[in-house]
Amino acid sequence: MKNTFLPFSKPSISETDIEAVAEVLRSGWITTGIKCTEFEQNICEYTGSRHAIALSSATAGMHLALHALGIGPGDEVITPSMTWVSTINLITACGAKPVFADIDRDSLMITADTIAPLVSKQTRLIIPVHYAGAAVELEPIQRLAQEKDIMLIEDAAHAMGTEYQNKRIGVDGTAIFSFHPIKNMTTGEGGMFCTDDQSLADRIRRLKFHGLGVDAYDRQSHGRAPQAEVQEPGFKYNLPDMNAVLGICQLQRLHEFNEHRAALAQLYIEQLASIEQIIPLKQPESTTRHAWHLFIIRLDIDSAGMSRDTFMSELKSKGIGTGLHFRAVHMQKYYREHLQSKYELANTEWNSERICSLPLFPDMRDEDITRVVDAIKSVLRRTTK
Ligand SMILES: *Cc1c(COP(=O)(O)O)cnc(C)c1O
């Protein structure tokens, strides 16, 4: 066992999960239906959100949000460059301009202070990211958005179970969660659009299924109401029941998953503390519960005498998988060549060269943490003589 490859992430799928999915497969109704509705209700109960709309991905949710808010040419959207590429791709594909706020060097999150100077007459929307399972410092950003009459959508892809000032992410405002297999709970692929805005919820629900004004599933007709007519041009982003039922099961285990993630993260923190080439992240105080989606370290590339990419491939050769969350988007090929403005984002760029995500998933054992830390020590020992 000792020499098997330790992946950076792996979903925790139980026999109960498998049986529940099999039951849907046998039921005669596998796409969006009652399981999806049940999943949405369970999420509302969990987060405290007024509305939850299940979608085929978080990216789908972001697309529908931008579309519903009418974001297009001439509009600016403030977001970090240190995020998953989907947000920037969608803003760009909508014809709007992404405007990058720099991040706090040690939390990897944008702040009201880095956002404020970028607000212009064209600014329509701010999309902060709750990073790695910690909460973004939301209140000052909410205040800024309100003052300037700008909309705010939280990218909560990492934040299922995160609490900000003792409240779950999603309870107020609008937040989009992801259930991609690496996230804290999974539906295979999937996302959840949570909002307390009734008219936005109605709009998202309509847009997610061709703009028909009905869900993919209608209780009366046991399928889609065949007479439904297009109310507005929409998309096809519904979540099938075979995925939703997995979400129902995973949500029941989320607390247990997150508790184990937190315990593993604590072991990492203790065991890495003595390695001086490893720079830890700072845990924001207003995060009253950390979902520990990722365990991110920064490599001090000067004292380590190697690049982060070399560090990652050395670990790989020792059977340890790692991840990179994220490569700053403004430094990637298309955006290097096509951005309308030039950006100097000191903290984003500094971190983009140094961050690395270590293995962290609920089925890991304590020994796996020691194995990762030993591998790190041995990689670093070789260069620091
Ligand atoms: C995973 C992720 C997304 C996209 O989620 P999908 O469900 O894969 O579309 C968006 N933003 C962040 C920060 C993510 O990590």
Image (cartoon, helix red, strand yellow):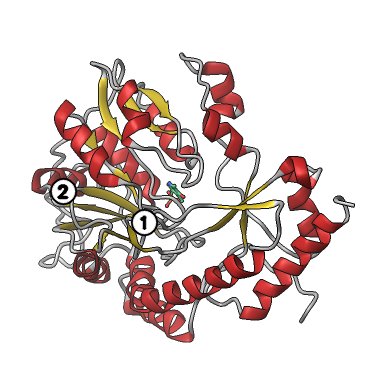
Q: Is mark 2 within 8 Å of ligand 1?
A: no
Give the percent coordinates (x, y) of residue 359: 62, 64
Q: Is residue 369 above or below residue 61?
A: below
Q: Amino acid at mark 1?
A: Glu
Pick the front one: 19 or 160: 160
Q: Which mark is residue 285?
A: 1
Q: Residues within 10 Å of mark 2 (few under 14, many from 20)?
A: many
Label disc, if present, on residue 126 of the rendered structure: none
Q: Secondary structure at mark 2?
A: helix
Of residues 304 and 153, the one drawn nearer to the viewer in this rendering: 304
Q: For this view, does 200 lie left or right of residue 333?
A: left
**Residue plotted at (32% across, 78% down):** 27
Amino acid type at circle 2 is: Ala
Q: Earlier in the sequence, mark 1 or mark 2?
A: 2
Classify 302 as above or below 280: above
Q: Residues within 10 Å of mark 1 (few under 14, many from 20)?
A: few
**Which quadrant holds residue 238?**
bottom left
